[in-house]
Image: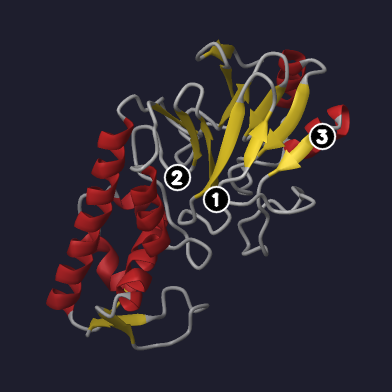
């Protein structure tokens, strides 16, 4: 059974037993509150993990909140809701082949909407980019932002088109700079104690990668994603290139929206067959 870690007077963390290259030590499930509890990102449907959450919450579970419906974030919600009657909170979307369709809500939570009880409040901050139904949650009592996969503690997240959008992602990151945040609690990796510095660093990382895409297109001319990948990601181990190809695709789609690049084979579903050229 995974350890319950006390983060603050209002926050506890349980890490799901799903470590891997994309999840680091596993998906962090955050329990907010003591008298009433909101579980944020319950994680995969692993029986021991679900039982650990239930044992920690007791009969105080009020909300099961998900930042987005990827399979490492929301499948445990169904069992928690069935056991406690807690209310599911989040956004669902049309399945793009990467979604957990077991998670359902009566209605999608709105940007800026509050979840309130006597002990704490959570505000929904709509942050599309990693995926189009991604929502962060702000705990103003402690200045903590539960960031899901919008930020990765110790790395950068993958943007997977078409539901993931690099242009939206950068816009969402910039939006966070206007919030009062002291700590970012991501679903993977460590707590981020210098939030604004990390957000700015991540924005610059993405813009730097975008500049490499433009340089590569200028050097290679009309190119496929497969041709561009080893050039743009020459600083990344080749074992990770398959994953990186999704973010490269997202960068190219952003450059298309910005009027910088042109897709010469207009078939979005033909991933890897599209060719790109600078305008």
Question: x and y percent of residue 249 in the render?
Answer: 38, 67
Would you call the spot at circle 3 few (<14 residues within 10 Å), some (14-19), or many (20 or more)?
some
- C-alpha span from label 1 to label 3: 21 Å
Task: Tell me if I can see residue 42 in this picture.
Answer: no
Quadrant placement of the C terminus:
bottom left
Q: Tell me, for residue 50, which label it has, or none.
A: none
Q: Which quarter of the figure has residue 154?
A: top left
Q: Tell me, for residue 150, which label it has, or none.
A: 2
| SS assignment at label 2 | loop
- Residue ID at (34%, 88%): 264
- Residue ID at (69%, 51%): 100
In the image: residue 234, left or right of residue 193: left
* Nearer-N-terminus badge (2/1): 1
In the image: residue 81, left or right of residue 153: right
Q: Which quarter of the figure has residue 192?
A: top left
| SS assignment at label 3 | helix
- Residue ID at (38%, 49%): 175
Q: Which residue is mark 1?
A: 134
Question: x and y percent of residue 67 in the render?
Answer: 58, 43
Q: Which residue is mark 3?
A: 81
CB-based contact (under 8 Å), mark 1 and mark 3: no
Q: Is residue 209 above or below residue 1?
A: below
Q: Is residue 26 above or below residue 67?
A: above
CB-based contact (under 8 Å), mark 2 and mark 3: no
Quadrant placement of the N terminus:
top right
| SS assignment at label 1 | loop
- Residue ID at (48%, 61%): 164
């Amino acid at each position: 059974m995974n350890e319950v870690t006390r983060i603050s007077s209002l926050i506890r963390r349980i890490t799901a037993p799903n470590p891997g290259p994309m999840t680091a030590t596993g998906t962090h499930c955050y329990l907010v509150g003591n008298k009433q509890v909101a579980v944020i990102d319950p994680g995969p449907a692993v029986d021991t993990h679900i039982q650990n959450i239930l044992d920690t919450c007791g009969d105080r579970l009020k909300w099961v909140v998900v930042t987005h419906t990827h399979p490492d974030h929301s499948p445990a919600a169904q069992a928690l809701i069935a056991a406690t009657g807690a209310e599911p909170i989040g956004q669902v979307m049309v399945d793009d082949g990467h979604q957990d369709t077991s998670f359902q809500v009566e209605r999608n939570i709105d940007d800026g909407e509050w979840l309130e009880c006597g002990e704490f409040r959570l505000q929904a901050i709509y942050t599309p980019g990693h995926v189009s139904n991604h929502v962060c949650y702000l705990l103003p009592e402690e200045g903590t932002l539960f960031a899901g996969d919008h930020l990765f503690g110790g790395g950068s997240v993958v943007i997977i088109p078409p539901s993931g959008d690099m242009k939206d992602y950068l816009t969402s990151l910039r939006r966070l700079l206007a919030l009062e945040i002291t700590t970012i609690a991501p679903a993977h990796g460590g707590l981020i104690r210098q939030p604004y510095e990390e957000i700015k660093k991540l924005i610059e990382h993405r813009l730097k990668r975008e500049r490499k895409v433009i340089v590569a297109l200028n050097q290679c001319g009309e190119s496929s994603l497969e041709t561009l990948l080893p050039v743009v990601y020459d600083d990344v181990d080749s074992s990770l290139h398959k994953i990186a190809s999704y973010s490269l695709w997202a960068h190219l789609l952003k450059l298309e929206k910005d009027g910088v690049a042109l897709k010469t084979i207009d078939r979005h579903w033909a991933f890897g067959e599209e060719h790109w050229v600078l305008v």
